[in-house]
C-alpha cells in the first residue's frame, strides 16, 4: 500500500529537518522566532518543567568556530549579569553536531520598536528608557559593555518589564581595552570610535543617546550636533534640559559624553525630579522657574494666605 | 526629622507669624498681641503634631492636606469663639487664614519628614 504525503506536510518536514538536533529529550523545538548573524532563536518546550523556553543555537557552519565561541561568551555574560532587565539563562550545551546552544527564559512581549509607537508623552518614554539605562548601568558596573544597543535589542514584556537582549557582542571592559580593533555594532547607534573598533562604556552611552533620540523622534540621530538638535526640536520639542542630555550622550568625542550609563541615569533622575542637570547650565531665570515648579503647591498656599491676610487688612 | 515634630515646628512658626498678622488685619487688637501670639502658637503646635501624626500613618498628599484643613479650622473656630475685650468676634479673620495654615502644615508633613517604619 502506498501512502502519499501532501505538499504541505512535505514542506513542513523539510523545514523541521533543518532544525538543530538537541541532545537528550528534555527540550523539543517548536518553531524558530528569530535569526541573527550569530544564532537562531527557537521556541522550545521544556518537557521536564513543562514550560516554554527560548533556545539560541549557533549559526556556525561547523562546531568550534568563532560563532560558537561568541555564543558561549554571550551565555556566560548573561549568566553573570543577574538583573531584572536581562533575560536569565537556564541551561547551555552542545548539539549532536557539536555546535553551541543555550536555553533562556521565553519573553512574551514586543520589541521596543513596536512598543514605542504606543507610548504617549515624554514621561512614558523616559520611564521605559530609564529601565534600559539602569540595565546597562548594571552591566557597566559588572565590567561589561553591550556594544549593540538598538530598538530591536530591547523588549518590553507583557507585565511591563523592559529587557535588554542580544549580548552576543558584549565584552568585558578591560578585555575590550586590550582587544584588537574589531568593528561591531549597528550604524546610527554606533559612535565614531566604535566604528574604528575602540568601544568603551561611553560607546554604550552614545547608543543610549541614539536610542532616546529615536524614541523621541522616530528618527536616527544625524551625525552633526546642530542637525540633531534641529530634528529633535522639530519632532519632539523636548525641554532644553532633556535635549541637552540627549546631545551630551551623542557627542562625537567620548570625553564629552557621560562616563557611563550610571552617570546618565543619575542625570535623567535629576531631570525628572525637576533638579538642575549636569548636561545643561541653567540661567538664573530657569533655576527660579524650576524652583517654582517644584514647590508650586507650597508657594500657591503661602500666596493664598498672604492674599487673604491683605484682603482682611484692606477691607476693614 | 519625624513628621509630628516637623508638623509642630512648621505649625509653631506659622502660628507666631499668623498671630503677628493680627497687627495688620486688626490693629485694634494690639494691646492683646502677646496673648494672641501665644494662643496662635499653641494652636499651631497642636495642629502640627496632630497633622504630622496623621502624615506618619497615611501617605496621601490630598488626605493630609484635607486633614490639616479640618483640624486647623476646628482649632481656629475654638479661638474665634472667644470674644475680644470689646465683645467682637473675628470668625472669618481667624478661621480662613488659620485653615490655610492647616493646609500648609498638611502639605509640609506629607512631603517632608520621615515616617516611622513599623516592624512586621
Image (spheres, coloured by chain):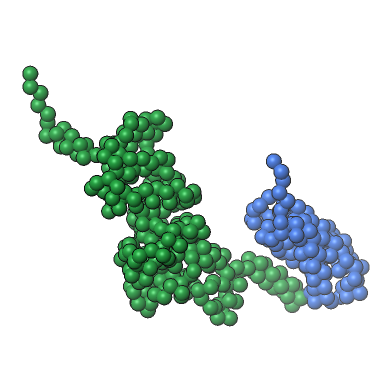
Chain colours: A green, B blue
| Residue A220 appears in the rendering | no
Task: Compare residues A299 and A108 and report the one nearer the observer.
Answer: A108
Q: Find residue A122 and report its image quarter.
A: bottom left
Point out the image quarter for the N terminus of chain A.
Answer: top left
Q: Residue furthest left?
A: A1
Residue drawn 12% across the image and 31% down it:
A6
Residue drawn 82% across the image and 57% down it:
B46
Residue A295 percent across, percent down from the top left:
63, 68
Residue drawn 33% across the image and 70% down it:
A196
Q: Find residue A129 and report its image quarter.
A: bottom left
Residue A22 percent across, percent down from the top left:
30, 36
Task: Compare residues B5 and A265 and report the one nearer the observer.
Answer: A265
Q: Residue furthest top?
A: A1
Q: Find residue A218 and report its image quarter.
A: bottom left
Residue drawn 68% across the image and 55% down it:
B64
Q: How many marks?
A: 0
| Residue A144 appears in the rendering | yes
Q: Is residue A54 above or below residue A48?
A: below
Residue B29 percent across, percent down from the top left:
87, 73
Q: Is residue B81 left or right of residue A6?
A: right
Q: Is residue B86 left or right of residue A134?
A: right
Q: Residue furthest bottom?
A: A284
Residue A107 percent across, percent down from the top left:
39, 44
Q: Is residue B40 left or right of residue A36?
A: right
Task: Compare residues A63 and A136 and report the one nearer the observer.
Answer: A63
Q: Is residue A137 above or below residue A26?
A: below
Point out the image quarter for the C terminus of chain A.
Answer: bottom right
Amino acid at each position: 500500500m502506498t501512502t502519499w504525503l501532501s505538499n504541505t506536510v512535505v514542506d513542513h518536514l523539510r523545514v523541521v529537518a533543518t532544525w538543530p538536533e538537541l541532545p537528550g529529550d528534555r527540550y523539543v523545538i517548536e518553531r524558530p522566532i528569530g535569526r541573527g548573524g550569530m544564532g537562531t532563536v527557537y521556541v522550545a518546550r521544556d518537557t521536564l518543567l513543562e514550560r516554554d523556553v527560548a533556545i539560541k543555537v549557533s549559526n556556525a557552519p561547523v562546531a568550534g568556530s568563532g560563532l560558537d565561541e561568541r555564543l558561549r561568551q554571550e551565555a556566560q555574560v548573561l549568566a553573570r549579569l543577574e538583573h531584572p532587565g536581562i533575560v536569565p539563562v537556564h541551561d547551555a550545551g552542545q548539539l549532536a553536531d557539536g555546535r553551541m546552544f543555550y536555553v533562556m527564559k521565553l519573553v512574551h512581549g514586543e520589541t521596543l520598536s513596536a512598543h514605542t509607537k504606543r507610548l504617549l508623552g515624554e514621561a512614558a518614554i523616559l520611564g521605559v528608557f530609564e529601565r534600559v539605562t539602569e540595565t546597562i548601568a548594571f552591566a557597566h558596573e559588572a565590567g561589561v559593555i553591550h556594544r549593540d544597543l538598538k530598538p530591536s535589542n530591547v523588549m518590553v514584556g507583557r507585565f511591563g518589564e523592559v529587557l535588554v537582549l542580544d549580548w552576543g557582542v558584549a565584552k568585558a571592559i578591560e578585555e575590550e581595552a586590550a582587544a584588537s580593533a574589531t568593528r561591531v555594532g549597528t550604524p546610527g547607534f554606533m559612535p565614531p570610535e566604535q566604528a574604528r573598533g575602540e568601544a568603551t562604556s561611553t560607546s554604550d552611552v552614545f547608543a543610549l543617546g541614539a536610542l532616546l533620540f529615536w524614541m523621541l523622534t522616530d528618527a536616527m540621530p544625524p551625525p552633526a550636533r546642530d542637525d540633531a538638535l534641529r530634528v529633535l526640536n522639530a519632532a519632539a520639542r523636548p525641554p532644553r534640559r532633556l535635549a541637552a542630555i540627549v546631545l551630551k550622550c551623542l557627542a562625537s568625542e567620548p570625553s564629552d559624553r557621560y562616563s557611563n550609563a550610571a552617570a546618565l541615569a543619575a542625570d535623567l533622575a535629576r531631570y525628572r525630579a525637576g533638579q538642575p542637570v549636569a548636561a545643561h547650565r541653567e540661567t538664573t531665570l530657569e533655576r527660579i522657574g524650576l524652583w517654582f515648579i517644584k514647590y508650586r503647591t507650597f508657594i500657591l498656599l503661602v500666596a493664598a494666605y498672604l492674599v487673604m491676610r491683605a484682603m482682611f487688612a484692606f477691607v476693614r | 526629622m519625624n513628621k509630628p515634630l516637623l508638623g509642630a515646628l512648621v505649625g509653631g512658626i506659622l502660628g507666631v507669624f499668623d498671630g503677628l498678622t493680627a497687627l495688620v488685619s486688626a490693629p485694634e487688637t494690639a494691646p492683646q498681641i502677646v496673648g494672641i501670639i501665644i494662643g496662635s502658637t499653641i494652636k499651631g503646635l497642636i495642629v502640627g503634631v496632630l497633622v504630622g501624626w496623621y502624615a506618619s500613618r497615611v501617605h496621601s498628599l490630598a488626605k493630609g492636606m484635607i486633614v490639616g484643613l479640618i483640624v486647623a479650622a476646628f482649632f481656629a473656630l475654638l479661638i474665634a469663639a472667644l470674644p475680644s475685650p470689646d465683645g467682637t468676634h473675628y470668625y472669618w479673620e481667624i478661621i480662613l487664614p488659620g485653615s490655610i495654615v492647616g493646609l500648609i502644615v498638611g502639605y509640609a508633613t506629607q512631603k517632608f519628614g520621615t515616617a516611622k517604619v513599623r516592624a512586621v
